[in-house]
Image (cartoon, rainbow, N blue to C red):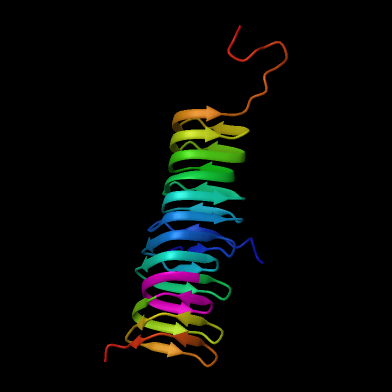
């Protein structure tokens, strides 16, 4: 099975419901609902996603709202506007990106420092 | 204009709407409504009511189809449902069960 073919929601198209799969997905249009991918999700500048996302990797250049869990990394580019919960071992927020919500990186604190200060 | 493409490992449960051509290689359940063409490629499974300008089926489609211009069932395709379109082409080898309405 060819898993390298581009999978794209074009800019004037919309999906309402659940999307799941194993190949990379590029959203230039709109998605509402749930996204579960074992791969890379890219939300382009024209893209708008209102969904709970459970993915391996996410790159946001457009708009996203919802709970985001990325197994590997989440990158918010300068044009990104994101609201919700962001959870990933690696999170990158570029200068110019807008984010409101909570971030959880599963940080391992160095020895000698206890969680919650003191 | 870029096509919307639903890849072969992708499963969508819900509704797809759009103004771009739509190509499905994976699985879609629910409802599809597009302004231009819909292609259900070989290996794809669609269980949905469909409305489009032209519909070309090479895979499997279960549901009612309204194609404003043309519906084509390719040789290896299977379709179950009612078809409504002014032009309907069923190729040798295609499987079809349902009503046909060509608006005559």
**Is residue B54 rendered to the left or right of residue A112?**
left
For the C terminus of chain A, the image quarter is: top right
Q: Residue at x 65, y 65 (%)?
A: A2
In the rendered view, tell whether residue A20 sits above or below residue B84: above
Residue A47 picture location, percent across and down? 43, 49
In the rendered view, tell whether residue A100 sits above or below residue B73: above
Q: Residue at x 34, y 69 (%)?
A: B35
Dominant SS of magenta comes to strand
Q: Quadrant of residue A80?
A: top left
Q: Residue at x 54, y 43 (%)?
A: A59
Residue farthest toward the right in the current orientation of the protein: A111
Residue B5 picture location, percent across and down? 50, 64
Q: Quadrant of residue A82?
A: top left
**Residue placed most toward the observer, A70 or A24:** A70
In the rendered view, tell whether residue B42 sits above or below residue B75: above
**Residue placed most toward the observer, A6 or B74:** B74
- Whether residue B45 is in magenta: the answer is no
**Is residue A14 rendered to the left or right of residue B58?**
left
For the N terminus of chain A, the image quarter is: bottom right
Residue farthest toward the left in the current orientation of the protein: B104
Count of numbered badges drawn on the protein: 0
**Which segment is the magenta one?**
B46-63
Q: Residue at x 49, y 69 (%)?
A: B23
Residue B17 picture location, percent across and down? 37, 62
Residue A52 picture location, percent across and down? 47, 43
- Whether residue B48 is in magenta: the answer is yes
């Amino acid at each position: 099975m060819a898993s390298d073919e581009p999978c794209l929601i074009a800019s004037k198209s919309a999906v309402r419901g659940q999307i799941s799969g194993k190949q990379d997905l590029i959203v230039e249009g709109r998605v509402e609902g749930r996204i579960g991918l074992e791969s890379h999700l890219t939300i382009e500048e024209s893209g708008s996603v209102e969904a709970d996302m459970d993915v391996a990797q996410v790159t946001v250049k457009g708009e996203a709202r919802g709970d985001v869990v990325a197994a590997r990394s989440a990158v918010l580019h300068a044009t990104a506007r994101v609201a919700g919960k962001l959870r990933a071992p690696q999170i990158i927020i570029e200068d110019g990106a807008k984010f409101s919500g909570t971030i959880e990186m599963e940080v391992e604190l160095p020895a000698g420092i206890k969680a919650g200060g003191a | 204009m870029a096509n919307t493409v639903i890849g072969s490992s992708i499963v969508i449960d819900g509704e797809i709407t759009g103004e771009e051509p739509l190509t499905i290689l994976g699985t879609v359940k629910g409802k599809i409504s597009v302004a231009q063409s819909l292609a259900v490629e070989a290996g794809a499974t669609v269980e949905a009511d469909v409305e489009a300008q032209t519909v070309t089926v090479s895979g499997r489609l279960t549901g009612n189809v309204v194609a404003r211009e043309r519906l084509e069932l390719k040789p290896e395709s299977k379709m179950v449902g009612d078809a409504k379109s002014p032009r309907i082409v069923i190729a040798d080898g295609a499987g079809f069960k349902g009503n046909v309405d060509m608006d005559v």
